[in-house]
Amino acid sequence: MMSDRIPMTRAGYDKRKAELEHLQNVEMPKIEERIGRAREEGDLTENAEYQYAKESQGLLQAKINRLRDELSRAVLIDPSRVAKDEVAFGATVRVRDLDLDEEEEFTLVGAGEEDYAAGKILVTSPLAQGLLGHKVGQRVEIEVPAGTTRFEILEIRYDQL
């Protein structure tokens, strides 16, 4: 099933992989060392440092598991191989919000590259999914958590090629 695949560029994949390796090889050993030191202090039932370190270990392990899962489902996308006349992975799309009469710009990126403040949105987000496959001049209505958003597509670029 394609929906459980996670589109990523090579850069996004490498960034996630580096983060995973850092967590496993640097952060986890630090926490394990803290647990060992706290354990040496005796009674674990009233040892706040031990409890905190164990909780931190659980949270870190959850993050490691999430990253492993994302990397295992990654599909590397080469943005240079997509159709240039329609919205696809890697596109920067300039739109007019038909309700607010404002222009906005979004770049559709893969996991590890999202930066909402900079307009870089996940290609798997409802907004990006609603833009995919459309061309300049088309109007789209997209269901988002806040309701329905209406856009006219003004421009499609592929800057990072």
Image (cartoon, helix red, strand yellow):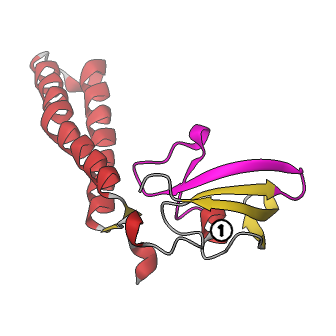
Give the quadrant of the N terminus. Answer: bottom left
Name the residue rendered at 60%, 69% in the picture. 129
Quarter holding residue 79: bottom left
| Three-letter code, disc 1 | Leu
Q: Position of residue 144 (x, y in %)?
A: 72, 62
Name the residue rendered at 29%, 45% in the picture. 15
50 left or right of 93 in image: left
Circle 1 sits on which residue?
131
The reply to whether residue 47 is visible in this rendering is no
Q: Is residue 88 above or below residue 33?
A: below
Span of residues in magenta: 97-125
Q: Is residue 130 above or below residue 107?
A: below
The reply to whether residue 113 is visible in this rendering is yes
Q: Position of residue 146 (x, y in %)?
A: 78, 56
Quarter holding residue 138: bottom right
Give the quadrant of the C terminus. Answer: bottom left
Which element carries disc 1, helix, strand or loop? helix
Q: Position of residue 12 (x, y in %)?
A: 34, 51
Name the residue rendered at 61%, 63% in the picture. 128
